[in-house]
Image (cartoon, rainbow, N blue to C red):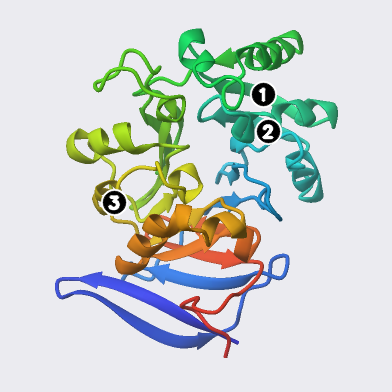
């Protein structure tokens, strides 16, 4: 048995109600339930899985989206050694309809090669090609322009369309489920002048009815500050923590602006628990945000519905709000 936490939003505000409920089982997952619906209705689900691409010291980012109509998407593809292809195969997934790469750092896109090597079909690849001068300012440790081009050429040679991510693009829109690009800058033509590659991250908003999830790539301080003060439609119940939560990431006011109830952080344990992540870690805690870290909790799955969401983890750790009973 597990304690199921239900958050109901009404005129009087939110309150937490605990009740015993049978824990759902999916790959040994322990489940937390957070809901603000009062009508008791159920709807189709959008399933978001933050893949475990951060074991040991590895730092990467990859998210699987399984849409209500059966479409399969990836938001980022992990690093060369992340084994995203293996994770998909173990789920019986041999084809990904669309892959969205937030920005051209290898810990987000280098897993594209192994997808092809291991027989995972890809329908469309969405990735902004970096401006060379922006990319080259991070050589040799960051952006690798030649490797990006080689990767894109390989996909094109397989007949996979390679498309850009542009602000305002609607990537999926079926009934009450929508995935769209809120912001995407090239590092040169931006409202704040030249930026680094992290601040070229495409910001995606996933909406399922009234449930919203924000994907932020590696959004850093300069653009994160601008968006916190001047951006729109950033509020979401669920946030993918930008830049693995490491210092240099978007400022606290960005997190305040999003005002999430649940945060998913793709970060290895040593990084998440380090001083580099202290600010984000402590700020989310001060906000009362339940934060799930794949380096600590293993694979994290969130089932989004029109009026609620349920989050599950492979490994329970001390301090998780839904404790065993």
The residue labelled by disc 3 is 252
Which is more toward the observer, 318 or 24? Answer: 318
Residue 96 rendering spot, x and y as whole percentages: 68, 33
> Viewed as shown, does residue 31 lie left or right of 261?
right
> Viewed as shown, does residue 158 lie left or right of 270?
right
Residue 259 rendering spot, x and y as whole percentages: 28, 55
Lower position in the chain sequence, tag 2 or tag 3: 2
Q: Are marks 1 and 2 in contact (CB under 8 Å)?
A: yes
**Above or below, comparing residue 252 to residue 98 in the picture:** below
* Cα gap from disc 1 to disc 2, whole angstroms: 6 Å
User: Residue, x 57% and y 22% (percent of image)?
Assistant: 143
Asked if one can make out residue 1 in the rendered structure from this viewpoint, the answer is yes
User: Element type at marker 1?
Assistant: strand
The residue labelled by disc 1 is 123
Q: Crowding near pointer 2: few (<14 within 10 Å), some, many (20+)?
A: many
| Quadrant position of the N terminus in the picture | bottom right
User: Element type at marker 2?
Assistant: strand
Lower position in the chain sequence, tag 1 or tag 3: 1
* Cα gap from disc 1 to disc 3, whole angstroms: 37 Å
Residue 80 rendering spot, x and y as whole percentages: 74, 33
Residue farthest to the bottom? 325
The residue labelled by disc 2 is 96
């Amino acid at each position: 048995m597990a304690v199921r936490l239900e958050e109901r939003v009404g005129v009087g505000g939110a309150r937490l109600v605990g009740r015993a409920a049978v824990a759902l089982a999916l790959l040994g997952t322990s489940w937390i339930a957070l809901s603000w619906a009062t009508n008791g209705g159920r709807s189709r689900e959008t399933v978001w899985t933050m893949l475990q691409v951060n074991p040991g010291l590895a730092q990467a980012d990859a998210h699987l989206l399984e849409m209500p109509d059966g479409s399969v998407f990836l938001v980022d593809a992990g690093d060369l050694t992340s084994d995203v292809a293996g994770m998909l195969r173990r789920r019986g997934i041999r084809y990904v309809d669309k892959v969205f790469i937030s920005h051209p750092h290898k810990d987000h896109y280098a897993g594209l090669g192994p997808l092809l090597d291991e027989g995972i079909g890809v329908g469309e690849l969405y990735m902004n090609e970096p401006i060379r001068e922006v990319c080259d300012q991070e050589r040799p440790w960051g952006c690798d322009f030649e490797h990006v081009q080689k990767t894109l050429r390989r996909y094109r040679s397989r007949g996979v369309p390679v498309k850009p991510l542009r602000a305002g693009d609607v990537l999926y829109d079926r009934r009450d489920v929508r995935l769209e690009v809120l912001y995407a800058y090239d590092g040169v033509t931006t409202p704040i002048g030249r930026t680094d590659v992290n601040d070229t991250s495409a910001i995606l908003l996933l909406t399922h009815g009234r449930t919203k999830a924000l994907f932020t790539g590696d959004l850093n301080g300069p653009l994160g500050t601008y968006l916190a003060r001047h951006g729109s439609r950033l509020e979401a119940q669920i946030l993918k923590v930008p830049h693995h939560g490491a210092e240099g990431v978007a400022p606290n006011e960005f997190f305040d602006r999003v005002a999430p109830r649940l945060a998913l952080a793709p970060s290895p344990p040593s990084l998440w628990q380090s001083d580099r992540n202290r600010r984000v870690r402590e700020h989310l805690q001060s906000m009362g945000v339940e934060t799930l870290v794949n380096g600590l909790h293993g694979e994290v799955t969130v089932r989004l519905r029109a009026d609620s969401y349920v989050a599950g983890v492979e490994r329970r750790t001390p301090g998780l709000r839904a404790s065993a009973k």
